């Protein structure tokens, strides 16, 4: 099972990207030939719907600046991840984000 890491700052995002790149390099031999499978349109639609539920949960728990994601991904200003409201809402809604990768 893959995990989604929510980076709350650009520095954390940079660290997560560096760790992910190292892990991908170190584990490449374990991947099936051709790499990871490309998600189907139905899988993408389910993932976006789950991310929309996460965004709604975040807003309901006080992180009012969290936009709904689109098929192009999430367009969120990294600075909002530093607010106490975002951090509190993220704890309440984390289960919804983790459900996107199952």
Image: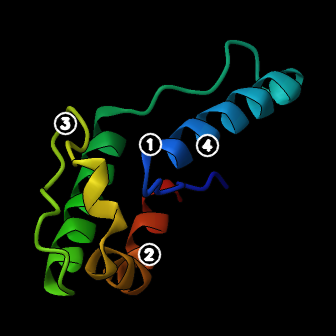
- Residue under label 1: 10
Q: Is 98 drawn above or below residue 9 in the view shown?
A: below
Q: Is residue 16 left or right of residue 53?
A: right
Which mark is in front, 2 or 4? 4
Q: Is 41 drawn above or below residue 4 in the view shown?
A: above
Which mark is in front, 4 or 1? 1
- Residue under label 3: 71
- Residue under label 4: 16
Give the CA separation, mark 3 to mark 4.
23 Å
Give the CA separation, mark 2 to mark 1.
20 Å
Which mark is in front, 2 or 1? 1
At x 53%, y 59%, the residue is 102
Q: Is 88 drawn above or below residue 29 in the view shown?
A: below
Label pair 2/4, CB-CB below 8 angstroms: no
Of residues 83 and 48, the one drawn nearer to the viewer in this rendering: 83
Whole-percent x, y for residue 36 in the image: 62, 26
- Residue under label 2: 94
At x 54%, y 55%, the residue is 5
Give the CA separation, mark 3 to mark 2.
21 Å
């Amino acid at each position: 099972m893959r995990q989604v890491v929510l980076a709350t700052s650009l520095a954390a995002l940079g660290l997560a990207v560096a760790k992910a790149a190292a892990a991908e390099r170190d584990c490449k031999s374990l991947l099936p030939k051709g790499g990871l499978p490309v998600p189907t349109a139905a899988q993408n639609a389910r993932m976006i719907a789950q991310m929309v539920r996460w965004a709604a949960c975040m807003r309901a728990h006080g992180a009012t600046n969290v936009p709904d994601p689109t098929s192009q991904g999430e367009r969120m200003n990294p600075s909002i991840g530093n607010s106490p409201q975002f951090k509190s809402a993220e704890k309440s809604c984390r289960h919804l984000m983790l459900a996107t990768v199952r």
